[in-house]
């Protein structure tokens, strides 16, 4: 799978760890930055990764900042993105099964690397259930379209 990744300085170390894990698993990782722990602005990098997912250049995306909150908000500003901040296995499973989330946000200060790896595995390996959930995802898309007009 081709996965877009991005972080700010607070999420840099966890992004690097998760990217290495994904490559070990055979995934292709596109790193949209940042590339150090020097202070930077997460919307720049979240936006680039989210656009890659929305365009279909990458199948899924993973973004990381200190809490995961700001970077998930930024990613969700890109049309077609459903980015969920998850810090536990149940939430990530349900956001894939019910919301068809195409991006995952992690909080580096809250999520140790071993847990992040498990969360990422669930995110990448859980299928969307469709059915009644598709109707709800369609309504989210409709809200997005209404706000753009």
Image (cartoon, rainbow, N blue to C red):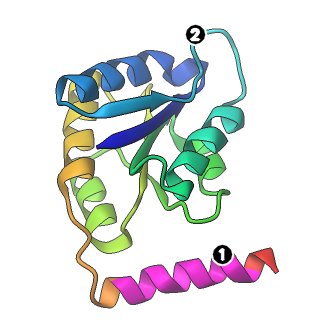
Reading the image, the residue beneath label 1 is 144
CA–CA distance in space, label 2 to label 1 = 33 Å
Q: Main secondary structure of the magenta part?
A: helix
Decide whether residue 105 is among the magenta residues: no
Few, some or many C-alpha atoms within 10 Å of disc 1 (few <14, some 14-19, many ≥20)? Answer: some
- Taking the spot 55% from the left edge, 56% from the top edge, the residue there is 55
Is residue 64 shown left or right of residue 38?
left
Q: Circle 1 sits in a helix, a strand or a loop, which is it?
A: helix
Q: Nearer the viewer, residue 85 or 81?
A: 81
Is residue 133 shown left or right of residue 74?
left
Number of labels in the image equals 2
Instruction: Please provide the residue range marked out in magenta.
Output: 134-146
Above-or-below relation of 45 to 74: above
- Taking the spot 42% from the left edge, 57% from the top edge, the residue there is 102
Instruction: Name the quadrant of the N terminus.
Output: top left
Decide whether residue 145 is among the magenta residues: yes
Question: Which comes sooner in the sequence, label 2 or label 1?
Answer: 2
Q: Which mark is residue 17?
A: none
Above-or-below relation of 35 to 11: above
Q: Circle 2 sits in a helix, a strand or a loop, which is it?
A: loop
* Position of residue 133 measured from the top left corner of the image (x, y, whole percent): 33, 83
Residue 108 visible in the shown view:
yes
Reading the image, the residue beneath label 2 is 36
Is residue 125 shown left or right of residue 83?
left
Q: Nearer the viewer, residue 87 or 5?
A: 5
Above-or-below relation of 145 to 18: below
Residue 65 visible in the shown view:
no
* Position of residue 48 measured from the top left corner of the image (x, y, whole percent): 63, 40
Instruction: Name the quadrant of the C terminus.
Output: bottom right
């Amino acid at each position: 799978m081709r996965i877009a990744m991005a972080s700010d300085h607070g999420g840099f170390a966890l992004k690097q760890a998760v990217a290495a894990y994904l490559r070990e698993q055979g995934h292709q990782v596109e790193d949209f930055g940042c590339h150090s722990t020097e202070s930077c602005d997460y919307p720049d990098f979240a936006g680039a990764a989210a656009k890659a997912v929305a365009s279909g250049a990458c199948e899924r995306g993973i973004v990381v900042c200190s809490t995961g909150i700001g970077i998930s908000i930024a990613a969700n500003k890109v049309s077609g993105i459903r980015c969920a901040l998850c810090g536990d296995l149940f939430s990530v499973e349900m956001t894939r099964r019910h919301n068809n989330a195409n991006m995952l946000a992690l909080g580096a200060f809250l999520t140790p690397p071993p847990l992040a790896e498990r969360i990422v595995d669930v995110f990448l390996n859980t299928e969307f259930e469709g059915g009644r959930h598709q109707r709800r995802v369609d309504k989210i898309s409709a809200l997005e379209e209404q706000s753009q007009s």
